[in-house]
Image: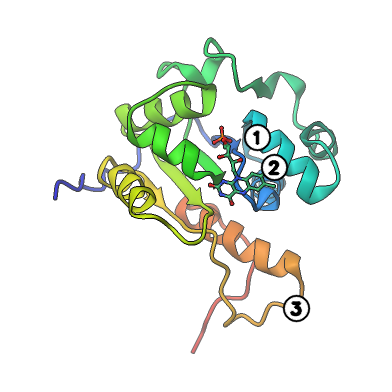
């Protein structure tokens, strides 16, 4: 198996991240990740797939545009997923990481096959070719052999596969606590300090 070595983290964009929300369940993971990075004064850009928009509205009762307005993301940092000419479509646009959260099996399959049919898939594949961190937060259950192979292909190409699987050892009391656990794991992977969950101390 050809797993790429972990490269030293390049200093690319001084805290600029792209949050990509696809049409998997768990839209709140993506919204909360966006909020948590903004709270930490990071420069957050965002893109939501067509089905991501649908699931955000279904699961949270609000369109993504309302969440973005509440989070005070400048409008020019929210991209149309169909726009393959938007800045994150180019490797010359520096990003510290792309985070696909939640990631549908459709998007995972497209990326694993090297398809760039929308801005999310393109930004992810740019990240891999530029050896920048790509975090994929898959949400599906059960996983078919095809899903597992696609996720394996992404991991072999250098992506971090960080399943949306909250833990219970920190004794979550609310759904927000469970969401924050997964978001905290994303921030850990980005080396961003946070207080989103209580760490295990034995
Ligand atoms: C309410 C709802 C929940 C969904 N949940 C999931 C899911 O958890 N995982 C998944 O892979 N697809 C899920 N889907 C299906 C995807 O939205 C569908 O495959 C879509 O093509 C994904 O497109 P995208 O990858 O461009 O966002 C869900 C769809 C709906 C309407």
Q: Given the current orientation, which residue lies at the most extreme bottom position?
A: 202
The residue carrying pointer 1 sits among few (fewer than 14), some (14 to 19) or many (20 or more) residues within 10 Å by Cα, namely some
The residue carrying pointer 2 sits among few (fewer than 14), some (14 to 19) or many (20 or more) residues within 10 Å by Cα, namely some
Q: Determine the secondary structure under disc 1.
A: helix
Mark carried by residue 51: 1
Quadrant where ligand 1 appears: top right
Q: Position of residue 122 (x, y in %)?
A: 45, 23
First in sequence: mark 2 vs mark 3: 2
Q: How many marks?
A: 3
Q: Is residue 179 left or right of residue 114?
A: right
Q: Residue at x 43, y 30 (%)?
A: 12
Q: Residue at x 14, y 50 (%)?
A: 1
What residue would you read off at disc 2?
A: 38
Q: Position of residue 146 (x, y in %)?
A: 34, 48
Mark carried by residue 173: 3
User: Does ligand 1 reach within 8 Å of label 1's beta carbon?
Assistant: yes
């Amino acid at each position: 198996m050809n797993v790429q070595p972990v490269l030293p983290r390049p200093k690319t964009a001084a805290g600029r991240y792209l949050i990509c929300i696809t049409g998997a369940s768990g839209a709140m993971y993506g919204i909360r990740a966006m909020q948590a990075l903004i709270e930490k004064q990071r420069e957050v850009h965002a893109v939501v797939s067509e089905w991501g928009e649908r699931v955000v509205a279904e699961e949270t009762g609000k369109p993504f545009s309302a969440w973005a307005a509440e989070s005070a993301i400048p409008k020019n940092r929210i991209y149309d997923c169909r726009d393959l000419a938007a800045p994150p479509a180019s490797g010359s646009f520096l990003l510290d990481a792309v985070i696909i959260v939640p990631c549908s099996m459709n998007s995972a399959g497209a990326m694993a096959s090297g398809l760039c049919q929308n801005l999310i898939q393109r930004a992810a594949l740019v990240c891999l070719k530029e050896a920048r961190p790509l975090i994929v937060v898959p949400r599906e259950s059960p996983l078919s052999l095809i899903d597992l192979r696609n996720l394996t292909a992404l991991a072999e190409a250098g992506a971090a596969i960080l399943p949306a699987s909250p833990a219970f050892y920190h004794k979550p009391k609310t759904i927000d606590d469970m969401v924050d656990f997964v978001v905290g794991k994303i921030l850990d992977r980005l080396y961003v300090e946070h207080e989103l969950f209580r760490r295990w101390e034995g």
